[in-house]
Image (cartoon, helix red, strand yellow):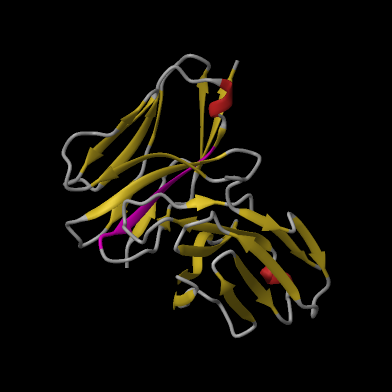
Amino acid sequence: DAGVIQSPRHEVTEMGQEVTLRCKPISGHDYLFWYRQTMMRGLELLIYFNNNVPIDDSGMPEDRFSAKMPNASFSTLKIQPSEPRDSAVYFCASSLTGLPFDEQFFGPGTRLTVL
Amino acid sequence: AQTVTQSQPEMSVQEAETVTLSCTYDTSESDYYLFWYKQPPSRQMILVIRQEAYKQQNATENRFSVNFQKAAKSFSLKISDSQLGDAAMYFCAYRDNAGNMLTFGGGTRLMVKP
């Protein structure tokens, strides 16, 4: 398996523009997670899905952020409108089950820069 | 809320030597799970080792081992025979028995000197 795939790897955009980050989880994994990594706040969970259904979105910072999972092999994280403080690395991760000992496999991340 | 603290922003070690990275956490739970993740310059987060809180025996994975002190809420990572490829950011993470959320510490940057 190719692992968790994220695109794009880098995204530079201007304030006010819409940004869409994409993720393909490992085939057969039922759980998908979106994390954000910044120098100030470290790694924080934004939202996670179980069988394509959003379970906990309490980490989503504002209404400008939205995430969808239309099918088991694809998820998007959208920021509209983007702001400079959204600049961060966004990671997608997936796991086979939701069991607490289960490993979460991370993608390579998308580095987002909002000018 | 659970918190995870890594008090060493940076550590360095000589190649082939041993280094220990510190992690403490705060929780009121009795059953939980702890993890160490490695993030090399490629940015990919890689699981290094994990520990179940109900197990007294410390986890080991080849050159990596942990010292889990439940009463002290401490979970340190020991890397033996350090290699240049071990240079990376290391994150300690906590997960309770009920939730799916991983709570991460702030990370420790490990440098390995040849």
Q: Locate residue B78, reporting x and y percent.
A: 37, 29
Residue B45 vertical placement versus A23 (above, below): above
**Residue B95 within the segment the image draws in magenta:** yes
Location of the N terminus of chain B (image quadrant)? bottom left
Q: In screen coordinates, is A104 left or right of A112?
A: left
Residue drawn at (66%, 41%) of the image = B42
Main SS class of the magenta portion in the image:
strand
The segment highlighted magenta reads: B89-97
Q: In screen coordinates, is A98 left or right of B84?
A: left
**Location of residue A77 (image quadrant):** bottom right
Q: Locate residue A53, reporting x and y percent.
A: 47, 77
Q: Locate residue A93, reporting x and y percent.
A: 52, 57
Residue drawn at (67%, 75%) of the image = A78
Whether residue A56 can be seen here: no
Q: Locate residue B89, reporting x and y percent.
A: 54, 40
Residues A24 and B94: in front is: A24
